[in-house]
Image: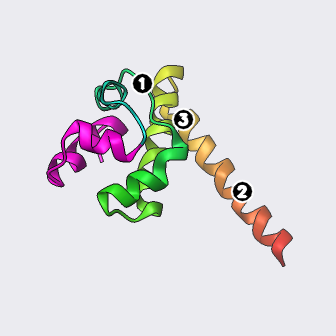
Amino acid sequence: MKTTFGEYIKKLRSENGMTLTQLAAKLDLDSANLSKIENGKRDFDEKRLPKLAKSLKLNLKTLQDEYVTDQIGKQIYEMNCSKQLLKVAEEKAEYRRVLNKKKAL
């Protein structure tokens, strides 16, 4: 999805007919902090993902995947990574999966 995690939250909140204040209360946040998250000025706390999933009636794994891809994307952007570097990182991740499978056997 081509949105930040904050934009994703805002979209889902709107689709669920919730106000900023309503969702913030369910997440034990004040509305100012949630607004900052939705506008990309503050990061979402990963520990709140289960509450967010429950509040928006989402699958937690799907929400976690969206969160992780946003965090990775943010790091790639901030570190100004090349596409070649990303290809190597993907190869290393696959190598780790293979090693882990071997250890499990």
Q: Which of marks 1 and 2 is nearer the N terminus?
A: 1
Circles 3 and 1: CB atoms closer than 8 Å: no
Residue drawn at (62%, 42%) of the image: 89
Q: Main secondary structure of the magenta part?
A: helix
Which residues are drawn in magenta?
A: 1-27
Q: Give the amino acid type for the residue marked by disc 3 in the picture.
A: Gln
- Give residue 50's position: percent from left, percent from top: 48, 55
Disc nearest the viewer among 1 and 2: 1
Residue occupied by mark 1? 42
Dot 3 falls on a residue whose secondary structure is helix
**What amino acid type should be assigned to the residue bearing mark 1?**
Arg
75, above or below 58, in the image: above
- Left or right: residue 38 versus residue 100 is left
Question: Quick check: can you spot residue 36?
Answer: yes
**Foreground label between 3 and 1:** 1
Mark sitting on residue 95: 2
Judged left or right of residue 45, residue 2 is: left
Q: Which of marks 3 and 2 is nearer the N terminus?
A: 3
Amino acid beneath label 2: Tyr
